[in-house]
Amino acid sequence: QVQLVQSGAEVKKPGASVKVSCKASGYTFTGYYMHWVRQAPGQGLEWMGWINPNSGGTNYAQKFQGRVTMTRDTSISTAYMELSRLRSDDTAVYYCARDTVLLWFGELSYYFDYWGQGTLVTVSS
Amino acid sequence: DIQMTQSPSSVSASVGDRVTITCRASQGISSWLAWYQQKPGKAPKLLIYAASSLQSGVPSRFSGSGSGTDFTLTISSLQPEDFATYYCQQANSFVTFGPGTKVDIK
């Protein structure tokens, strides 16, 4: 069965960076785009961008450009999201989420059928 | 950017009730819309995609309709496990989520 397992909670100081991992199993990791979505406490969902695990290509939401870096390691079926220059309003649960469409079919669907369990990142001095 | 709104922001309902949630996009998005269910402390779950297509494994009491700017999610007969927050999401131009609708027990 498809599973996305994320790394554990992090506490960071303002100005620091955080790197969250998302290990995929149960399907061909390089066959589906991976997205990252975050949710501040008690708030709604915010899309951050995607990575093509096959090519390593990325596309980031404008809000996060310059601060976010998405990478992958195909040898261990793991995607990463690194956010730099952290601020208190970056405190949120960060999710990885798989796109529904097989990568080789072309366009992304931007629908998310499998999600990781979430990683709480707390930014506090 | 495409903005998404939802109404109501919360609804109190009883088991067996029919519940309808509305989502509106700030510009036309054709049928590029999904609905998700989220329970406290859990990741969202995809219910509906392409405005009206039921995701595999999702009960048939959930249905979606609409196109352009106005969309609805209907739960035909509310079950105890349906008490949750529901989000719409546009997929026409990258991704934007609505603010959510909380369905709680009356």
Image (spheres, coloured by chain):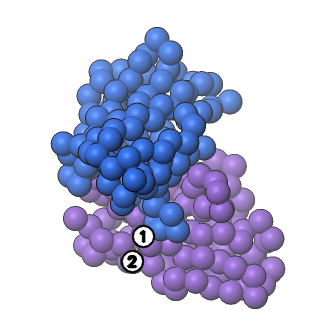
Label located before the other in sequence (2 or 1)? 2
Q: Colour of chain B?
A: purple
Percent across and percent down for residue A97 are 49, 42
Of the numbered discs in the image, which one, if any, rests on residue B5? Answer: 2
| Quarter-of-image position of residue A54 | top left
Report the side of A68 relative to B42 (left or right).
left
- Quarter of the figure with residue B73: bottom right
> Residue at position x 23%, y 54% from top?
A63
Question: Does the rendering let one see residue B14?
Answer: yes
Where does the image place residue B78, in percent across and percent down from the top left?
75, 75
Report the amino acid beneath label 2.
Answer: Thr
Q: Is residue B99 above or below residue A69?
A: below
Tag 2 secondary structure: strand
Can you identify the residue that label 1 sits on?
B98
Q: Nearer the viewer, residue A17 or A54?
A: A17
Decide: is B81 above or below B69. above
Disc 2 to disc 1: CB gap under 8 Å: yes
Chain for numbered disc 1 = B
Note whether A36 is above or below A41 in the view shown: above
